[in-house]
Amino acid sequence: MKTRIHSAFTLIELLTVIAIIGVLAGILVPVTSRVRESARNAQCISNLRQIGTSLQLYLDEHRDTYPGPFYTVQSFYFTGDPDGTGFINLSRRLSPYLSSHVVPGNKRKVPVFICPSWELVMKNVSDAEYPYVINLDPKYPDGVTKWSNSKQPFGDANGPKPPHRASEFTDCPRSQTWMLSELDKKRSSRTDPMPEKPVHGSPIATNSTTTIMWRVRR
């Protein structure tokens, strides 16, 4: 009578396979996470460059005058304003140059004004709509000049103060002066919903900023 041999995993073999899977997961998961974050960073930089380019197009068509006046924080929403009065975001003014024209009266998101990493961090936070700040110095690192409160390029909707012409700013290089920067609680005392810390890392090295000459500073 022949003895039938049954093939099976021993406990040691099973544990070995589980250990190998665990090691591979430990290697692949962080790599995948870094790849995804790198993709979000690239998209954020691309968005900021598009905003900078659209601003230059706006200046070319409006006698070198910045859009405005605006409030300091900038929402990724804009509301159509058929009468040309009331509160309008930077995104609303630049929308014709961003291929995201809005029908007056509609309120919707402008994708270019949303950083993917910011959106990921704030996805479960209600009323979070202010990813960027303009005009004021948000404790930005050395090397990036701040605008003084008396000379805000986009004007001030609180004043209201009208926006300025680009040719007025001769005291600081436009390529060294930030136009728009990401907003977080480490660099702002505002109470609006915002990330606890910079979504791309440390506030010195990795906050994306569009300068007046549409270069992106990290």
Image (spheres, grey):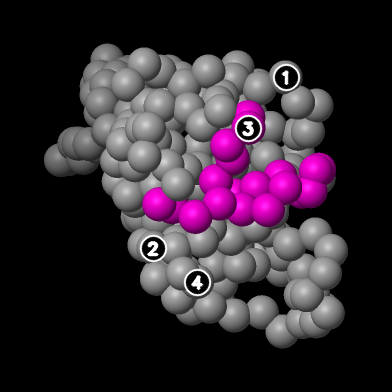
> What segment carries the magenta color?
149-167
Looking at the image, is mark 1 or mark 2 earlier in the sequence? Answer: 2
**In terms of secondary structure, where does tag 2 sit?**
helix
**Of callouts 3 and 1, which one flags the residue occurring earlier in the amino acid sequence?**
3
Q: Would you name the residue on which mark 4 appears?
A: 62
Q: CA distance from mark 1 to mark 4?
A: 34 Å
Q: Vertically, is 216 above or below 140?
A: below
- Kindly indicate the quadrant of the structure image that contains residue 76: bottom right
Nearer to us: label 3 or label 1: 3
Amino acid at dot 4: His
Amino acid tagged 1: Ser
Q: Which mark is residue 150?
A: 3
Q: Which residue is mark 1?
A: 189
Whole-number angstrom distance, CA of label 3 to CA of label 4: 22 Å
Name the residue beneath numbered marker 2: 56
**SS at badge 4:** loop
Q: CA distance from mark 2 to mark 4?
A: 10 Å
Q: How would you rate the neighbour count of disc 1 (Cα within 10 Å): few for under 14, some for 14-19, many for 20 or more?
A: few
